[in-house]
């Protein structure tokens, strides 16, 4: 395909590929059928696959995820959309009490090979509740896998990997970069299962770990700097399982670490990465692990959004600190 | 406090009254000694197994247990009427239902002893694992029925739940989705009058539970849950109807929780002896026994043979359970995902190291 694709295009394409390959893949959620999804990720799927496989549901996240539990335990591979991650919370009981634990409590006789997709993160100045980054909540629930792509190619391949995974996967889509990042997609998909990070840049001075739309923010910051440090820039992609090997190898090489997350600071994944680095690469560190994060506050209304989100200034300043420690 | 004067309520379907008298006009199914004695046996097995579990818990050999005493007819009637078809979605009080379905009593001992292996044979019998998270599983039944529709293999899904469950948000979502999707789901509600200590009247202002289905666009009706014949007959009719139309359906089975909520509860704190005694008169086993004695020549010998047979089954199950080796601690880690991620492999190794360092 020669025309560059956005994240939305790539996800749409992955849906089609998956649904053509495998009759058991179905889609459900609010507005996913006739409307093609409020972000158009599922555009055209109803026309191609019909209402039995592309289902508009009533307005109930508990119902969406609960019926996903029942479906996936009985032979389907549902891709359930929650319209915004801020609205996952009514479904948390179904996620935590059922989706994540059916395999272990039935000792593998019932399983949930399902994907829950949701747009997350801020940066598009929407009404309140539409900018959440609470990925740490899902990472902390045993039995789930959690992934988040930062570019179209990865989005396509990671959705393939997520749908093929035998366990439930939270697939978090950074809405800010739904259309702003474009790249060409190869003819065939190359499924990426949960658990692998991606190295975008290779360097010696500092390891920078990020994910989601922040990853693109970090990338742009590095590109804009005249004397950018030589950095290992790594997109985590998978928040659980984490690609520990890539992370630890990088830290052992550079000795300096910057983690950039949009999510609130306390209990966020930068804390987890710091603990991991502490356990596996402590003696290689030249500086404490630095992190750039959102604040321990509710995501602000749009007029103050730019002050909340880690921007180039905050990232650059943190980079200088960790390099010069 | 509630006494549930249901015999005066016209809309509660009943064929066999508490004294074992049959209403011929309402009977549609063919009765036989073998059908009736097998219903009775299943109810008896549950009754005695249930009491054994309580005793074992008091002896410290089982964990907290939730008694099904008093609800045997409701559960056995449904399960037997399905004749092995359909998919069952129990809550945690469905001892009678799962035994009637063929789950081995030794596996129930495993579950109540606190062992995940107690769920392992459910799949082969079309039984979903127990659900302790009240009201959260009927939506699973809806999803399963929807899957079977999509797969071109329409199958009845039967979630079992109580009066308390009908208040939960995900329960209402289940009714709503079932109504919109027209999935063949038989919502089987055992109104046993109590949600731990909260009586039925405090659970909802709705006059009946069955009427809640009307709000979601499909029919519901009430049945005397202590009448095994009414439940059996109703289930056979609804099994066909739910698949043919297709439609969901709500059945409110009026029954009573004769025991405590669980062995960690003391119901005397919140209800009267008089009430319990009044409901003992409506005991499901009693009415079926009276009917068998009167119409099918059920003798005292038959009764005592049955009790011995059932007790032997339970004794054997306990023996079998006691022979099962302890669960492997590795399974804590290994059952979480299909393949161990790195994090869990490390944690499994930590646990192994800890166990070998005695």
Image (cartoon, coloured by chain):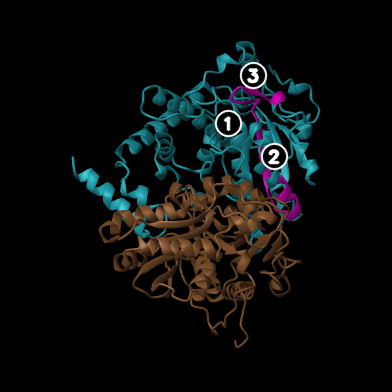
Chain colours: A brown, B cyan
**Secondary structure of residue under mark 1:** helix
Cα separation between marks 2 and 1: 16 Å
Based on the picture, tell me whether residue B276 belongs to the magenta stretch: no
Based on the picture, tell me whether residue B176 belongs to the magenta stretch: yes
Which residue appears at 55% of the width and 31% of the height?
B43
**Secondary structure of residue under mark 3:** helix
Q: Are marks 2 and 1 in contact (CB under 8 Å)?
A: no
In this rendering, do the residues under marks 3 and 1 share a single chain? yes
Q: Do we see residue B270 in this rendering?
A: yes
Residue farthest along the left direction in this orientation? B358
Mark 2 or mark 3, whichever is nearer to me: 3
Picture quarter with the N terminus of chain B: top right
Front one among B115 and A92 = A92
Which numbered disc covers residue A221? none
Mark 2 or mark 1, whichever is nearer to me: 1
Q: Which chain is home to disc 1?
A: B
**Secondary structure of residue under mark 2:** helix
In this rendering, is residue A91 above or below A119? above
In this rendering, is residue A77 above or below B48? below
A52 left or right of B346 in image:
right
Q: Callout 2: 10 Å neighbours few (<14), some, many (20+)? A: some
Residue placed under numbered mark 1 in the picture: B72
Residue placed under numbered mark 2 in the picture: B233
From the top left corner, tell me how far across and down residue A206 is, in percent: 37, 67
Which residue appears at 53% of the width and 33% of the height?
B41
Front one among A26 and A259 = A259
Mark 2 vs 1, N-terminal side: 1
Front one among B342 and B166 = B342
Give the extent of the magenta segment: B175-202
């Amino acid at each position: 395909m020669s025309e560059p694709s956005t994240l939305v295009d790539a996800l749409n394409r992955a849906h089609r590929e998956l649904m053509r390959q495998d009759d058991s893949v179905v889609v459900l959620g609010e507005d996913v059928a006739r409307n093609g999804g409020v972000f158009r990720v599922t555009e055209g799927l109803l026309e191609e696959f019909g209402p039995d496989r592309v289902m508009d549901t009533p307005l109930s996240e508990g119902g969406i995820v609960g019926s996903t539990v029942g479906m996936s335990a009985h032979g389907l591979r549902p891709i359930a959309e929650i319209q915004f991650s801020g609205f996952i919370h009514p479904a948390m009981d179904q996620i935590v009490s059922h989706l994540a634990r059916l395999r272990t409590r039935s000792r593998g006789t019932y399983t949930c090979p399902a994907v829950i997709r949701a747009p997350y993160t801020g940066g598009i100045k929407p009404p309140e509740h539409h900018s959440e980054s609470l990925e740490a909540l899902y990472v902390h629930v045993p039995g789930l896998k959690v992934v988040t792509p930062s570019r179209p190619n990865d989005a396509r391949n990671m959705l393939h990997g997520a749908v093929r995974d035998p366990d439930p996967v939270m697939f978090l889509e950074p809405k800010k970069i739904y259309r702003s990042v474009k790249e060409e997609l190869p003819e065939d998909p190359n499924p990426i299962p949960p658990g692998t990070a991606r190295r975008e840049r290779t360097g010696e001075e500092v390891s920078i770990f990020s994910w989601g739309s922040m990853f693109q923010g970090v990338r742009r910051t590095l590109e804009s700097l005249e004397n950018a440090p030589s950095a290992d820039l790594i997109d985590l992609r998978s928040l659980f399982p984490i690609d520990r090997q890539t992370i630890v190898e990088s830290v052992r090489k550079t000795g300096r670490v910057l983690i950039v997350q949009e999510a609130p600071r306390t209990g966020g994944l930068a804390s987890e990465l710091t603990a991991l680095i502490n356990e596996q690469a402590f003696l290689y560190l030249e500086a404490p692990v630095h992190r750039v994060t959102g604040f321990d506050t509710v995501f602000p209304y749009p007029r103050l959004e730019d002050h909340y989100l880690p921007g180039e200034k905050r990232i650059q300043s943190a980079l200088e600190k960790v390099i010069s420690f | 406090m509630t006494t549930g004067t249901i015999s005066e309520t016209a809309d509660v379907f009943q064929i066999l009254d508490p004294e074992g008298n049959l209403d011929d006009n309402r009977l549609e199914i063919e009765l036989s000694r073998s059908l009736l004695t097998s219903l009775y046996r299943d109810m008896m097995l549950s009754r005695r197994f249930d009491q054994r579990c309580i005793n074992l818990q008091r002896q410290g050999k089982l964990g907290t247990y939730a008694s099904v005493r008093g609800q045997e007819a409701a559960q056995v009637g449904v399960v037997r009427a399905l004749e092995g078809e359909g998919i069952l979605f129990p809550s945690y009080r469905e001892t009678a239902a799962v035994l009637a379905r063929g789950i081995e009593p030794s596996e129930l001992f495993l579950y109540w002893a606190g062992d995940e292996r107690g769920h392992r044979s459910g799949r082969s019998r079309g039984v979903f694992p127990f659900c302790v998270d009240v009201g959260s599983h009927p939506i699973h039944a809806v999803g399963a029925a929807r899957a079977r529709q999509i797969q071109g293999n329409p199958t009845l899904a039967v979630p079992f739940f109580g009066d308390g469950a009908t208040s939960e948000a995900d329960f209402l979502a289940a009714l709503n989705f079932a109504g919109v999707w027209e999935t063949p789901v038989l919502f089987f509600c055992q109104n046993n009058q109590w949600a731990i200590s909260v009586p039925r009247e405090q659970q909802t202002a709705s006059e009946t539970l069955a009427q809640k289905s009307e709000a979601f666009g499909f029919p519901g009706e009430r049945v005397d849950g202590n009448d095994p014949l009414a439940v059996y007959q109703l289930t056979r009719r609804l099994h066909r109807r739910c698949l043919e139309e297709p439609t969901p359906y709500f059945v409110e089975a009026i029954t009573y929780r004769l025991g405590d909520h669980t062995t960690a509860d003391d119901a005397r704190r919140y209800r009267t002896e008089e009430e319990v005694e009044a409901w003992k008169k409506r005991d499901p086993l009693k009415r079926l026994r009276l009917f068998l004695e009167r119409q099918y020549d059920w003798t005292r010998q038959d009764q005592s043979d049955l009790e011995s047979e059932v007790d032997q089954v339970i004794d054997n199950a306990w023996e079998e359970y006691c022979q099962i080796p302890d669960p492997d601690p590795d399974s804590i880690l290994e059952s979480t995902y299909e393949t161990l991620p790195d994090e869990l492999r490390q944690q499994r190794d930590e646990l192994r190291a800890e166990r070998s360092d005695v």
